[in-house]
Every structure is written in C-alpha cells, then in structure tokens.
C-alpha cells in the first residue's frame, strides 16, 4: 500500500505526558497535507511517529504496510524523510556538499550516484554556490534549504517539512513552491507542519487541524478555513486575505487575492 497510516496511534513521553491521543490519519504518495494548530496541539509528535522517531505507545503506524515498531528509525527514514524546523538541529557536516552527500554515502551508494544526487538537489534548491562552504557560515534561510536537499538526496517516498517558510522571503517561497511542484511530479508525499496559513491555503488542498492532542478535522483546505468552530478550537486564523474578505461580507471561503478580486467584482456587479 502506497501510504502512511496512523491507526489509533497514541504517544506518551517517558515523563508521562500524553502528546497524541488516538490519531487516525492516512497520507498517500504524491499527496500534500498541511497539519495546523497551536503550539502544543501534538503536530510535531504526530509527524515524528510517521518516520519512526517516535513509536506509538498504543495503536500502530504503518509505512507502506510496514509497522514502524518492527523497524529502526534509520530504516523508516529512508522512506519518510524528516526536515527539522531548526536546520541547526540537523546539520553536522563541515561543508554543504558533505551534508547533502552524507546519507547517500551512509546507504553505500557509489560515488558517481552520490555526486549526481548532490548536484540535482542543489540545483533544485538553488544552493549550488554554497556547496564548498561551511553550512554554519551561510544565511539561516539558506541552511533550511540545505537540510531539505539533504533529505531529498535519499529519494524518499515521503518528506515531512516542519515550518519550512519560517524566515523565508518571497524568493524563498518561490523556491519552495517549485520544490513542491517537483515532488508532486515524482509522486512524493509531502506533509508540512505550518503556522503560515497563506502557505497552507496556496499550496495544500488537504489540511489536518489539531487541538488538544487530537485531530479535530481532516478535510479540504477551503472547508477548514471557512469553519469558524474549527478555527476557534485549533486557535488558527484564516489567511490574511480571507480575514479581510470575511470582515467586509465577501464570505468565509476566500483563500487568495485572485479569489478576493473575483468575488468583489461579482458583488459589485450584482
């Protein structure tokens, strides 16, 4: 089965804190899923169960039919790559090239294949100019692209992006947009945790809202952002343009500027 499945999955930390309670979720290859909710809702713990960093204390997590309880994190990570929110928590090599090449070498790929993968992902993320540099000497937002490149070099079936737009400017968002499009072409599943509602609205058709350690709604992005009760429970807001549209009576379902203009023209013409 080409999917990740959380089946009645719960996770409790050693200190007794229950972070996830009875989660049921399926993410299929090639799908984009944004997970939203306030800090402490259980988002990060949930995605860490998807790649084996956490093993559920109750229920199961299945990756392409394999139960994560039966495999090491390293084995699962080859299929489900995880990009940390803070790149400094992930990077440990002395050059960008070495950072990207590390996992392909770990998996004992030949040098020609390693080099090919490094060049491909560096071009995709527009970081070719930094390959010989120490990653801690380049801008923070560029380091985030280094960590994405390092995961993509392993060619996973799924990739988890934790707050990928944090600190990014418009140029960075354009790069991320192109990366998402390329991953979709290759049928790589994408799961993102984000507080950037514009990013979620513009790039994800499916949104999972979490609150109080549970999934409270899993649905179409428009349905999520037009549901006042879900927004209240998960303590998130509509995208900025959606807030403006709602405040002037254009409706609760506007996701972007194009839709705003279209609806405004319709209202003015009526």
Image: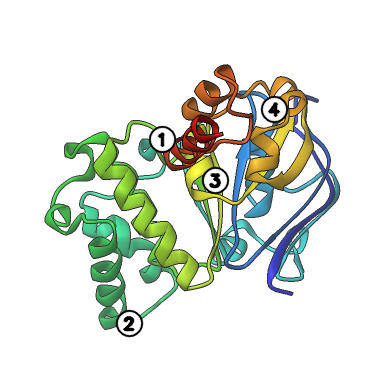
In this rendering, would 222 be left or right of 263? Answer: right
Q: What residue did someone put label 2 on?
A: 110
The correct choice, above or below, for 149 with respect to 246 in the image is below
**Given contact means CB atoms under 8 Å apart, are the residues at marks 2 and 1 in contact?**
no
| Distance of label 2 from label 4 (alpha carbons) | 42 Å
Q: Can you see residue 234?
A: yes
Residue sitting at x 50%, y 35%: 269
How was this image coloured?
A: rainbow
Q: Nearer the viewer, residue 77 or 175?
A: 175
Residue in the image at 67% along x and 53% along y: 50
Q: Residues within 10 Å of mark 1 (few under 14, many from 20)?
A: some
Split into 4 quadrants, where in the image is the C terminus?
top right
Task: Rate crowding at label 4 as few (under 14), some (14 to 19) or many (20 or more) other CA atoms within 10 Å.
Answer: many
Return the mark for residue 41: 4
4 vs 1, front mark: 4
Q: Residue at x 54, y 46 (%)?
A: 192
Q: Which numbered disc flags the more N-terminal residue, 2 or 4? A: 4
Residue assigned mark 1? 86
Which of these two is toward me, 163 or 185? Answer: 185
Which residue extends farthest front? 270
Q: Which residue is mark 3?
A: 192
- SS class, disc 1: loop
Mark 2 vs mark 1, foreground winner is 1
Give coordinates of residue 1: x percent, y percent: 74, 75
Q: Which element carries disc 4, helix, strand or loop?
A: loop
Q: Relative to the observer, which residue lies in front, 128 or 231?
A: 231
Mark 2 and mark 3: Cα distance apart in space: 31 Å
């Amino acid at each position: 089965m080409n999917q990740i499945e959380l089946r009645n999955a719960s996770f409790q930390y050693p200190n007794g804190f229950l972070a996830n309670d009875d989660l049921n979720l399926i993410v299929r290859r090639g799908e984009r899923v944004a997970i939203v909710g306030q800090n402490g809702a259980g988002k990060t713990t949930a995605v860490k169960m998807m790649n084996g960093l956490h093993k559920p204390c109750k229920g199961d997590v299945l990756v392409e039919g394999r139960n994560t309880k039966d495999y090491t994190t390293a084995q699962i990570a080859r299929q489900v790559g995880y990009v940390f929110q803070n790149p400094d928590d992930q990077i440990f090599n002395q050059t960008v090239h070495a950072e990207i090449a590390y996992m392909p070498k770990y998996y004992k790929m030949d040098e020609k294949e390693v080099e090919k993968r490094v060049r491909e992902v560096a071009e995709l993320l527009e970081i070719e100019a930094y390959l010989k540099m120490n990653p801690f000497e380049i801008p923070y937002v560029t380091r985030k692209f280094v960590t994405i490149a390092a995961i993509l070099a392993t060619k996973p079936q799924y990739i988890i992006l934790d707050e990928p737009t944090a600190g990014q400017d418009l140029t960075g968002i354009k790069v991320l947009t192109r990366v998402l499009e390329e991953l979709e072409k290759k049928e790589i599943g994408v799961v993102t945790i984000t507080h950037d509602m514009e990013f979620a609205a513009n790039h994800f058709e499916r949104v999972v809202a979490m609150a109080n350690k549970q999934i409270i709604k899993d649905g179409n992005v428009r349905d999520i952002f037009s549901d006042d009760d879900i927004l209240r429970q998960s303590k998130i807001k509509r995208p900025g343009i959606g807030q403006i549209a709602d405040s002037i009576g254009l409706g609760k379902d506007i996701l972007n500027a194009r839709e705003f203009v279209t609806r405004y023209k319709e209202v003015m013409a009526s």
